[in-house]
Amino acid sequence: MPSVVGLLEQHELAARRRVDELREEADRIQAELADLTESRT
């Protein structure tokens, strides 16, 4: 049976990965928005 601490560590690692993925996605969206904004002016 896995320990509670081990499960929490796995959950934290998965959450950190998801945060990294969301940050990368946000960066891509911001870059795309900046490109669209520049092309409109």
Image (cartoon, rainbow, N blue to C red):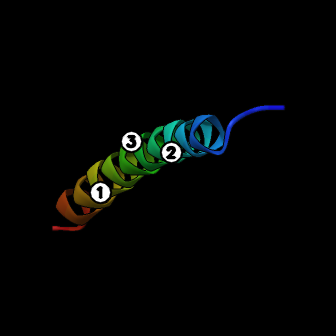
Q: Earlier in the sequence, mark 2 or mark 1?
A: 2
Name the kind of residue labelled 2 in the image: Glu
Position of residue 10 relative to residue 11, above or below, is: above
Q: Spatial distance from mark 2 to mark 1, Cα to Cα?
A: 27 Å
**Tag shown at residue 30:** 1
**Tag shown at residue 12:** 2
Number of residues whose C-alpha sits closer than 10 Å to that of mark 1, classed few (under 14), some (14–19) or many (20 or more): few
Q: Position of residue 7 (x, y in %)?
A: 66, 40
Q: Spatial distance from mark 3 to mark 1, Cα to Cα?
A: 10 Å
Between 16 and 26, which is closer to the camera in this rendering? 16
Between 11 and 27, which is closer to the camera in this rendering? 11
Between marks 3 and 1 in the image, the one whose residue lies nearer the viewer: 3
Q: Are marks 2 and 1 in contact (CB under 8 Å)?
A: no
**On the image, numbered disc 3 is attached to which residue?**
24
Q: Position of residue 11 (x, y in %)?
A: 60, 45
Name the kind of residue labelled 1 in the image: Gln
Q: Residue furthest right?
A: 1
Q: Earlier in the sequence, mark 3 or mark 2?
A: 2
Position of residue 15 relative to residue 10, above or below, is: below
Residue at (84, 32) in percent of width and height: 1
Q: Earlier in the sequence, mark 3 or mark 1?
A: 3
Name the kind of residue labelled 3 in the image: Glu
Residue at (48, 41) in percent of width and height: 21
State the SS at label 3.
helix
Give the side of residue 4 with respect to residue 36, left or right. Answer: right
